[in-house]
Amino acid sequence: MTKKIRIHLADDHQILIDGMKTLLHTVSNFEVVGFSLDGSTLFEEVTDNKTDILVLDISMPKKDGIEVIKEFSKKGFPCKVIILSSYDDLKIIKEVMKLGASGYLTKQCAGESIVEAIQSVFNGEEYFCNTVRAKIFNTATKDNSKLNKYTPSIDSILTGREIEVITLIALEFSGKEISEQLFISNNTVETHRKNIMKKLKAKNTISLVKFALKNKLIKS
């Protein structure tokens, strides 16, 4: 039998909690095991109910999401954390990801992304919704005259994240710089690089650059 993913929801709006519960209950291997309207006792709650994934708002009374993440980071994460927030400020995103969050979604895209986010994070991946990913990537490549608009067909070969990684590789970003720009770990960058090379049957970085040029990821 497929293991149930145990989910705890933390937001100061009961109506959002109720809506999320309704949505998540439609997924057979999801189980909402608890919810909180403030962050004061979240560490104890998610530990007691053996939570796998905490979906956490930034703005909450008594103890906000950033304070909760700091507490988790200090005591040891009892579960994985996905931030679900109205804020898309890159400073906040960068801060919570550095503290150990595994994903970040804006509330505007939660309905279409939250199921995928929970499944991805549970499987050990990091997850950003399209709005956040676009903002991060646009910031990383801002003012780069070699950046181009890629051909749509590339979507059938690489994932959105892989397109971002190969573009930055082609723009001569180092692994460390890609890690910093996309708010992912060095290990995750290397995993994406290996997956890209495997998919494209590329032998080296030069092959990746040639692919990026051919598919108009960057300008020559």
Image (cartoon, helix red, strand yellow):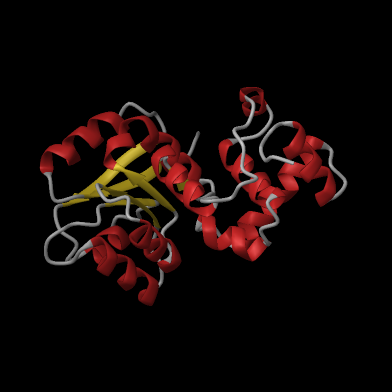
Seen at 31% across and 43% down, the residue is: 106
Seen at 46% across and 44% down, the residue is: 133
- Name which quarter of the figure residue 164 lies in: top right
Q: Position of residue 109 (x, y in %)?
A: 33, 35
Residue 130 relative to residue 49: left or right: right
Residue 213 relative to residue 161: left or right: right
Q: Nearer the viewer, residue 73 or 202?
A: 202
Residue 60 relative to residue 125: left or right: left
Quadrant, the C terminus: top right
Residue 32 relative to residue 60: left or right: right
Q: Nearer the viewer, residue 115 or 28?
A: 115
Q: Residue furthest right?
A: 203
The answer to whether 35 is drawn above or below residue 130 in the figure is below
Q: Position of residue 177 (x, y in %)?
A: 60, 63
Seen at 20% across and 49% down, the residue is: 35
Q: Is residue 122 visible?
A: no
The number of numbered discs placed on residues in the rendered structure image is 0
Q: Position of residue 70 (x, y in %)?
A: 33, 71
Seen at 41% across and 62% down, the residue is: 94
Q: Nearer the viewer, residue 128 or 35?
A: 128
Q: Is residue 172 visible?
A: yes
Q: Position of residue 59 (x, y in %)?
A: 19, 57
- Name which quarter of the figure residue 92 lies in: bottom left
